[in-house]
Amino acid sequence: MSLTTKEIKEILEILEASGWDEATVTVGDVTVTVSKNGAGTLAAVPAPAPAPAPSPSPSPVVHAPVPPEVAPPSLNGGHTIESSTVGVFWRAPEPGAAPFVDVGSRVDVGQQLCIVEVMKLMTPVHADVAGTVSAIHAANGEKVECGTPLITIDPA
């Protein structure tokens, strides 16, 4: 697995918008370290090989329930909102809070739909069309990639 130029640019934009001087991101076998204000240089190096896993010990199997709102990408011509970055999809502003939207929710342009978390940086995702939420494609807490369908809205 490797990072695209677009993904590296997104990492640089996130760093620039943050209060950090330097950040290191590892994706698969590639590690990218970026810095600003002369703190270092851009480097892409292979990540070290993982240590061998210890022998597994028996543990209970826990199955996370899949919310009924999760659906395959819309094929009915709705407007699909995609993730603009790699991260973790969150439906609510904090654990235990009500989700921003559910299937059937009416949304306006600019309304927050969800959050994609990248390195503890919460990136809000907003509706760019008004309408009704017809599908939520990612499960809460699911890792998403750039371009992953998140929510489909049937325009008003």
Image: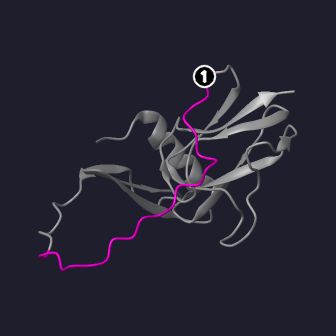
Q: Position of residue 68 (x, y in %)?
A: 61, 50
Q: Is residue 7 left or right of residue 138?
A: left
Residue matched to label 1: 75
Q: Position of residue 109 (x, y in %)?
A: 85, 37
Closer to us: 130 or 66: 66
Say which of 39 and 126 sits in front.
126
Q: How would you classify the magenta stretch by its main secondary structure?
A: loop
Quadrant in the picture for residue 95: bottom right
Query: Which residue is found at the position 48% from the left and 35% from the top?
Result: 6
Q: Is residue 70 magenta?
A: yes
Which amino acid is tagged 1?
Leu
Q: Is residue 24 magenta?
A: no
Left or right, 146 with respect to 100, comes to: left
**What segment carries the magenta color?**
54-75
Asked which secondary structure carries label 1, the reply is: loop
Q: Quadrant of the C terminus?
A: top right
Vertical placement of residue 33 versus 105, above or below: below
Asked which quadrant contains residue 80, the reply is: top right
